[in-house]
Amino acid sequence: VDKLRYNIIDKKLKIIITPKEGKLDPSQLTFDEGKPPFDLILMLDAANIEQLGEMYDQNTELFFNLPTINIDHHASNEYFGKINLVDLTATSTCEILVALFESFGEKTIDETIATCLLTGIITDTGSFQNSNTTPKSLSIAAQLIGLGAHQQEIIQHVFKTKPLSMLKLWGKALTDIQRDAKHSLVWTTLNHKDFEEANATKEDTTGLINDLLSSAPDTNIVLLLSEKEPRMIHGSIRTREGIDAAKIAGLFGGGGHTGAAGFVLQDKDIKEAEKFVLKQIRTYQEREIKGGKVE
């Protein structure tokens, strides 16, 4: 080889080799992937590896070749890491991280980190309104505020600041809300067109089921079905005490907590998903009532 140079065009690497004499035959060239510039994969708040979505799908080999640490608090966790730190008594993964960071040393948690950790605890407990709130979560929250966490800033950004696109989307969801008194069920749906018309993002459903739908009286199960991508349905479930939301989500391959859970359905439009999910939930309710497990 006389010269070797490269350039990048349209995000593609072009390698130019000039031989000292003659020409190179393609059979003389081989390509090997270099060592990935990572030492470890850390996975937080995921019950199974499929929840990592495209990050896993596009880097499957990386997940097999590198050490993986799975930190989570969901009862449905599949312990898919090479190292698994799963605490089912924790109200959030951030609660687990507080203890982990403390083990690193006294000055690990500064104001910024404390604010981030408190945000996770507040959002997972619904600002300490959900039934999963424990004395430990309240104690850790107080500890984080003592370390400088900006609690009022979190409340302002998470609960009191909503873009117009989100409000439009929520309005559509509330307009279409339905109730099945026999099965103590309230639900609503959002199709992909609703997101486009409201100019809303996938994240704009955040808080809808907790802040509004769960306020419905005389209701044991609240369901939100959202077609965030064409023929990709995201389901969110909230339940009253005595009904396991994670078990219901498990009917559709999902999981979560006793009072809050979720799932994803692929290759179904919103109407197909609505019919399918409602049938399964009603059957579940009737079976539980017959067994004397639901009052």
Image: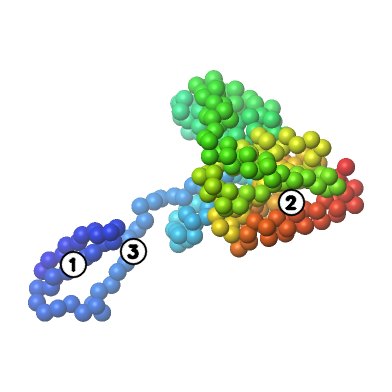
Judged from this view, the residue extending furthest toward the top is 146
User: Does the image show residue 198?
Assistant: yes
Q: Is 13 rendered above or below residue 126?
A: below
Quadrant that contains the C terminus: top right
Instruction: Identify the residue under disc 3.
Output: 33
Distance of mark 3 from mark 1, alpha carbons? 18 Å
Residue 143 x, y percent position in the rendering:
57, 23
Which disc is residue 16 wearing?
A: 1
Regarding mark 3 in the picture, which secondary structure is present there? Answer: loop
- 4 relative to 116, above or below: below
Judging depth in this view, the residue of 184 and 180 nearest the camera is: 180
Q: Quadrant of the N terminus?
A: bottom left
Query: Which kind of residue does numbered mark 1 sit on?
Result: Ile
Q: Earlier in the sequence, mark 3 or mark 2?
A: 3
- Label 1 residue SS: strand
The local crowd at label 3, few if under 14, some if 14 to 19, many if 20 or more residues have their Cα within 10 Å, is: few
Which residue is found at the position 51% from the left and 32% from the top? Answer: 116
The image quadrant that residue 133 belongs to is: top right
**Whole-percent x and y of residue 288?**
85, 51
